[in-house]
Image: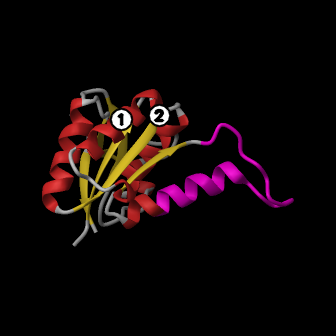
Amino acid sequence: MPKTAVGLFEKPDIVDAVVREIEALGFPRKEIRTVEEPATFEAIGVMSFPRLEFEVALLRELTMIGTTKAEAQAYVEGMQRGGALVLATGSDERVEVATDILNRNGAVEVEEAIGSEPQLPGVAPENIVSSSDSRVEAARPRRSGGGASVFIW
């Protein structure tokens, strides 16, 4: 099963150096991908929403490699704030080495937070139809320097 290490960086200027460091340890360049939000979004047609299309495609790609929807959304939000992603796919050993490099260079940790459903003002709890799982899941980036994650897909 393929594995992918994913690191979110708050400052895209470090990404090239991170990629060079991963490559220097024998990781094939074709297995490393960087993603930054485009500086401008060109509309292709009248009904084109380029930024939304970019984000939807990225969300789809991230969930395909094994992120939760909340984690994928946190990565997209990190990019909206000017961050960049580095993805490295390969064998267990190579992905482990790439993860160490991503962490050593300050990858931002994406934390999954699980809490109870928010209470809506003016709505009594007894009037709410409960679901089988009444937890709300969200993910948010944290600054820790140990934030690269490995996903198996």
| Name of the residue lying farthest toward the right | 46
Amino acid found under the numbered disc labelled 2: Gly
The mark tally for this picture is 2
Give me the disc on residue 86.
none
User: Can you say whether 139 is above or below 62 in the image?
Assistant: above
User: Can you say whether 100 is above or below 32 in the image?
Assistant: above
Q: Left or right: where does residue 29 sit relative to residue 2?
A: right
- Looking at the rendering, the stretch of residues picked out in magenta corresponds to 38-60
Query: Residue at coordinates 52% horizontally, 31% vertically from top-left?
Result: 81
Q: Left or right: where does residue 121 sit relative to residue 68?
A: right
Amino acid found under the numbered disc labelled 1: Pro
Query: Residue at coordinates 48% horizontally, 63% vertically from top-left?
Result: 60
Residue 116 image position (x, y, % from top left): 31, 46
**Res. 91 in view:** yes
Q: How is the image coloured?
A: secondary structure
Q: Left or right: where does residue 133 sit relative to residue 86?
A: left
Residue 79 image position (x, y, % from top left): 50, 39
Q: Is residue 48 magenta?
A: yes
Q: Identify the secondary structure beneath mark 1.
A: strand
Quadrant where the C terminus is found in the figure: bottom left
In the foreground, 22 or 132? 22
Q: Are marks 2 and 1 in contact (CB under 8 Å)?
A: yes
Residue 15 image position (x, y, % from top left): 40, 35
In the foreground, 136 or 2? 2
Q: Which residue is mark 1?
A: 141
Query: Residue at coordinates 31% horizontally, 56% vertically from top-left?
Result: 28
Closest to the camera, between mark 2 and mark 1, is 2
Q: Residues within 10 Å of mark 1 (few under 14, many from 20)?
A: some
Q: Which residue is mark 2?
A: 83
> Picture quarter containing residue 63?
bottom left
